[in-house]
Image (cartoon, rainbow, N blue to C red):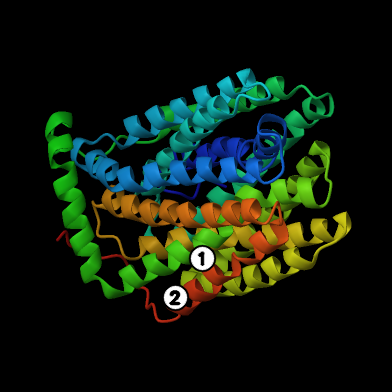
Amino acid sequence: MFKSWPNPRAVASWCLYDFANSVYVAVIPATVWSAYYSQAICGGGGEGPLWWGRAVSLTMLFVAVTSPFMGAIADLAGWRKRLLIIYTVASVIATALLATVAPGMVVYGFILSVIAGIGFEGAMVFYNAYMPALSPPERRGRLSGMGYAIGYAGSFLGLIAVLPLINAEMYAAAFAVVAVLYFGFALPSFIWLPGQHVATHGIGAAARNGWRGAKQTARDIWKIKPLRRFLLSFLLYQDGVLTIIFFSSIFARQVLGFEMSDLILVYIVVQISALVGASIWAKPTDTKGPKFVVLAMIIQWIVIVTLVYFVEEKLTFFIVAALAGTGLGAIQSASRALMATFIPNGREGEFFGFYSLCGKSSSILGPLVFGWIASATGGDLRLAALSVLVFFVVGGGVLISVRPNAEPPTQKP
């Protein structure tokens, strides 16, 4: 699988990192922890989704504000790999400490949720920035899709690993297992991902120039009309995707009466279908273009949200979840590949920092709106889910006017 790539060991470790953090995503924010925190820790009802929405939004706000600055530091000081390790370890430690949260410890659980989320989301800035260096432009769609596909295999492993523990209601042990798997599969990337280009600044000078560099990057991005339109579109439709992900388990548990083991089975279905979807759409991302794939997936997500509003039975929810899975990896992989077409060589950290800013900023409004509607209506999660439609419709409308570059710029501004 990896022998045909210029640096096969680095590519393999890059993909394994996606495997590692997908274990975290599958069990913590997407299924077990989000539902457990909402019901067992917060007491359910409308307050659980409200507190979880606050945790997600604060996480994304912090990462959104700091990502351009940290991306500039990574590029100037050559700290991309170090920051990847620091953020990842912070997330692993906070995940392990979730095992110490007991019912009623709402604030403590909230703080750990935010730290774990910041570590995971922040590390993705530096992880994504490696992609242009690991593959030529004509193969980035395949590399991006391969990373997501292997990541979904990681999600599957994580869910299978904790399922017996969840059935036995050993939640603390389940969270500890996630932390171990997360760190273990991330370790190869700490060893084999290449160091960055030679640093142009020391860490102190990089920090002092970080905000200046971030402002310059913002100005440079603003000058590229297709890029700023794409980032606005990405901010909108990604808000829809992430809001559905963060609240799907809470919806299934509170509206349809799913048990924790049912939630894991649903997410296993999502991971299998996502693996298939990411694999199927990887080549079309290169042949038909990432914009085509993203637009197709936006239409699919509009259908999914509409179906969620009307779903009444568990079997129907399983079917909708499978449909959602096929569009999950494809839209994320194609979006990352589309972003890469706009980035000048040598500025990957800065530009992916702003890409992360838009992605995380998108996750500030959606969860707040979802949680607010759920709380204001006494727990009407169907109406809260339906509100997500507007993000896909408007985001797709903006993306239609975007013309991607055939290749990324080669000159530094």
CB contact under 8 Å: marks 1 and 2:
yes
Return the residue at label 2: 399
SS at mark 1 in the image: helix
Give the mark, 1 or 2, whose residue is nearer the N terminus. 1
Which quadrant would the C terminus be assigned to in this image? Answer: bottom left
Relative to residue 99, is residue 16 drawn left or right? left
Label 1 belongs to which residue?
237
The quarter holding residue 313 reads: bottom right
Residue at 34% from the left image edge and 49% from the top image edge: 133
Which secondary structure, mark 2?
helix
Measured as percent of width and height from the top left, residue 21 is found at 55, 37
Q: Nearer the viewer, residue 266 or 52?
A: 52
- Three-letter residue code for mark 1: Tyr
Q: In front of the other: label 1 or label 2? A: 1
How many neighbours does mark 1 have within 10 angstroms: few (below 14), some (14-19), or many (20 or more)?
many
Type of the residue with mark 2: Leu
**Residue 410 visible within the image:** no
Where is residue 271 drawn, in percent x and y?
70, 49
